Image (cartoon, grey):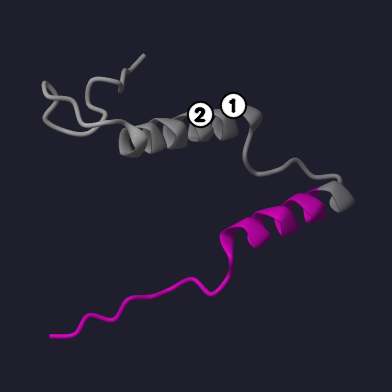
Amino acid sequence: MIEKVLINRVEPLNLELSTFVDCVRAGRPFPISLEEGTANLEVCERIAGCFSADWSADAKEPGASQVTTS
């Protein structure tokens, strides 16, 4: 069986920039708050850190010893 995968034809960063410009022109708030954007960036940095961390002899996964939660 072949599964059909839907692919977004709009480039996400281009859409984000376009939304920002539209909000500025219309005087509307951006749909993502500063706090939400900051939290998203922190999650992305943690994920990236997992991929860039060296394999540890004690760790079962790459970066496992470096990821902490607050």
Q: Residues in magenta?
A: 1-23
x and y percent of residue 29 in the render? Answer: 75, 40
Is 61 or 12 nearer to us in this picture? 61
Q: Quadrant of residue 63?
A: top left
| Three-letter code, disc 1 | Glu
**CA separation, marks 2 and 1?**
6 Å
Q: Which element carries disc 2, helix, strand or loop?
A: helix
Residue 40: within the magenta?
Answer: no
Residue drawn at 71 percent across, 43 percent down: 30
Picture layout, residue 6 above or below residue 53: below
Instruction: Give the quadrant of residue 34.
Output: top right
Task: Please name the residue shown 72% across and 54% down the image.
Answer: 17
Residue that label 1 marks: 35
Q: Which amino acid, by three-letter code, is at mark 2?
A: Ala
Q: Is residue 11 left or right of residue 56?
A: right
Vertically, is 26 above or below 9?
Answer: above
Q: Are marks 2 and 1 in contact (CB under 8 Å)?
A: yes
Q: Position of residue 19 (x, y in %)?
A: 72, 55
Q: Which residue is mark 2?
A: 39
How would you rate the neighbour count of disc 2 (Cα within 10 Å): few for under 14, some for 14-19, many for 20 or more?
few
x, y percentage for residue 37? Answer: 58, 34
Q: Quick check: 48 left or right of 61?
A: right
The residue that appears at 48% across and 29% down in the rendered structure is 42
| Quadrant including the C terminus | top left
